[in-house]
Image: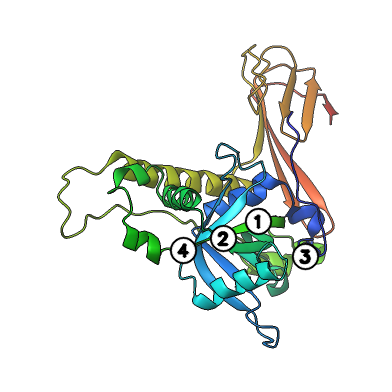
Amino acid sequence: MRNQLRYPAGQHNKVHRLAEKRASYDLETVHSIMNRSFVFHVSFQPDAEDPFPTTIPMLGAMGNFAYPSAGLNEPQDCYIHGYISARMANLSRKAMDDGLPGLPVCVSVAKVDGLVLALSAFTHSCNYRSAVLFGHAALVTDESEKLWALELLTNKIIPGRWDQVRQPPNKFELMQTQILRVRVTSGSAKVRAGPPADDKEDVQDPGVMKNVWSGYVPLVERMGQPIPSAYNQLQDLPEHVRDLQEGFNEEADAYNDKLVKQYSEPYRLYNTHISEYELGSPVTLYGDIPFMQAHRKDSYVGLFWLNAAETWIDITKTKTKTDTNTNTQWISEAGTLDVLIFL
């Protein structure tokens, strides 16, 4: 297993509330959430005497000009593009004149994946993915890095688009376009991806349970069907645009399915008269041998019983703030089961 690089938890990036359940400092998680988002919110202090910070929505992408092949699990800079005002450019230059690597900034993104409806208003929540970076922003002045960053940003939004448009950018375009590079010093992510966490008293109260609907409302960001411009002359939709829509939607649907399964699908163990074992499968199948096993990334369950008839077991978990309850439903084609459970 490869070592996972992490941002050290420090004064600025440390997650305090529910950190054990939701916080992550590994580079791949933080950078992946950043790159899944189109809009980066860039915050900075405009003036020492101004008590209010300035926040500007900008387009952004993670990348490493010195090592372009570096993955999201490796150190990355944050390149941002949008309306870079003269004030922002001057602040970055002044910071460098003062001996800093650039203008101190905070860059953040957040995505809401669904609404978690609980038994009380207090325990309502959202499933979400959020990430924050801290670093120093400076204008990219090297022409080769600027062109590389423009390609990075273009292909981050639409993979392969840079090679499909008119090249190269003309002098006017390059003069009007500014790129900021943020040298990242720290970062963190916070993710919620679970069912409601109701109070035990509410779950055990028949009056509450019979009168309050609890569950999950998915919120999925998907791309619609591409629409040609009024002056478009290409008859067929380019492959890279089609791939963009399909790939983006497949990834969004896959993540949503992962969240929804916590509500709709039990964790199922099978015994279906198949003596095949697949190490990579989430379910281990042993047929007439009266033993079956299921494994996840972080847990294993094994069962031995004296009746080896075709059998399956549905396992569902319900969580409260204090307890996790496991419920099972056993379905067997025949016989009485004497069971030993190995956890």
Q: CA distance from mark 2 to mark 3?
A: 21 Å
Q: Which residue does the image show at 67% across and 53% down from the upper left? A: 194
Q: Name which residue type carries label 3.
A: His
Q: CA distance from mark 4 to mark 2?
A: 27 Å
Q: Which residue does the image show at 50% across and 50% down from the upper left? A: 145
**Viewer-proximal residue, 79 or 25?**
79
Q: In the rendered view, tell whether residue 277 sits above or below residue 86.
A: above
Provide the residue designation for mark 1: 183
Quadrant the N terminus occupies: top right
Provide the residue designation for mark 3: 12
* Label 1 vs 3, first from the N-terminus: 3
Q: Nearer the viewer, mark 2 or mark 3?
A: 3
| Pointer 2 with pointer 3, Cβ within 8 A | no
Q: Position of residue 206 (x, y in %)?
A: 73, 65
Q: Nearer the viewer, mark 1 or mark 3?
A: 1
Q: Residues within 10 Å of mark 1 (few under 14, many from 20)?
A: many
Task: Name the element at disc 4.
Answer: loop
**Viewer-proximal residue, 132 or 332?**
132
Q: CA distance from mark 1 to mark 3?
A: 15 Å
**Viewer-proximal residue, 301 or 270?**
301
Q: CA distance from mark 4 to mark 1?
A: 16 Å
Quadrant the C terminus occupies: top right
Q: Name which residue type carries label 1.
A: Arg
Q: Nearer the viewer, mark 4 or mark 3?
A: 4
Q: Nearer the viewer, mark 4 or mark 2?
A: 4
* Label 4 vs 1, first from the N-terminus: 4
| Pointer 4 with pointer 2, Cβ within 8 A | no
Provide the residue designation for mark 2: 111
Task: Name the element at disc 2.
Answer: strand
**Viewer-proximal residue, 215 or 116?**
116
Task: Name the element at disc 1.
Answer: strand
Q: Nearer the viewer, mark 1 or mark 2?
A: 1
